Amino acid sequence: MSTSSAITAITNNASSSTLATSQTPQDLKNEFLQMLMTQLKNQDPTNPVDDTAMLGEEAQFSTLEQMQNMNTNLVSLMSMQNVSQAVSLVGKTITGVDANGASVSGQVASLVFNSGTPELKLADGSIVPLSNIQTISN
């Protein structure tokens, strides 16, 4: 594996901040039920809502909910992958750019977490985010 592909392989931007957090699944369920009840209350008694259409709407809502759950699980999995990949770099020598924009080089001594995201702490105390790694060597 080349150095550039190794660097690309260890960087992904998964975090809880990549999820839309404006509404919880419970909020969406409540909104859907309110809309459904409003639709039923205001329907024309001589032309009621088609049962098939209503079931279709419920199925679409259920599918959307499952997709949101899958997205949450995928982000968690990617976050765990970031930690695992960062751990594999402990003891290796890297060059990169620290959080202040300065070029740094050194052996990875440990990991630190910044808002749940793993970052590499070099032997000299420099902190390098995974996305700022330029080269990796043994």
Image: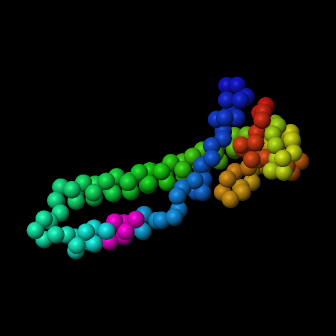
Residue 32: say if magenta. Answer: yes
Q: Is residue 75 left or right of residue 12?
A: left
Write down the quadrant of residue 64 in the picture.
Answer: bottom left
Q: Position of residue 23 (x, y in %)?
A: 48, 65
Magenta stretch, main secondary structure, is helix
Q: Position of residue 24 (x, y in %)?
A: 46, 65
Q: Is residue 8 left or right of residue 62?
A: right
The C terminus sits in image quarter = top right
Residue at horizontal 33 percent and vertical 57 percent from the top: 61
Rendered view: 91 above or below 29: above
Write down the quadrant of residue 113 in the picture.
Answer: bottom right
Q: Is residue 119 left or right of residue 24?
A: right
The residue most toward the bottom is 41
Q: Position of residue 6 (x, y in %)?
A: 68, 32
Residue at horizontal 67 percent and vertical 29 percent from the top: 5
According to the image, what is the colour scheme of the structure? rainbow
Q: Does any portion of residue 127 appear in the rendered image? A: no
Q: Nearer the viewer, residue 110 or 53?
A: 53
Rendered view: 63 above or below 89: below
Q: Position of residue 47 (x, y in %)?
A: 13, 65
The N terminus sits in image quarter = top right
Which range of residues does the magenta coloring cover? 28-34
Q: Total of numbered circles in the picture?
A: 0
Residue at horizontal 22 percent and vertical 59 percent from the top: 54
Rendered view: 50 above or below 11: below
The residue most toward the top is 2
Rendered view: 107 above or below 23: above
Residue at horizontal 71 percent and vertical 29 percent from the top: 4
The residue most toward the right is 124
Residue 57: say if magenta. Answer: no
Q: Does any portion of residue 1 appear in the rendered image? A: yes
Q: Is residue 24 left or right of residue 128?
A: left
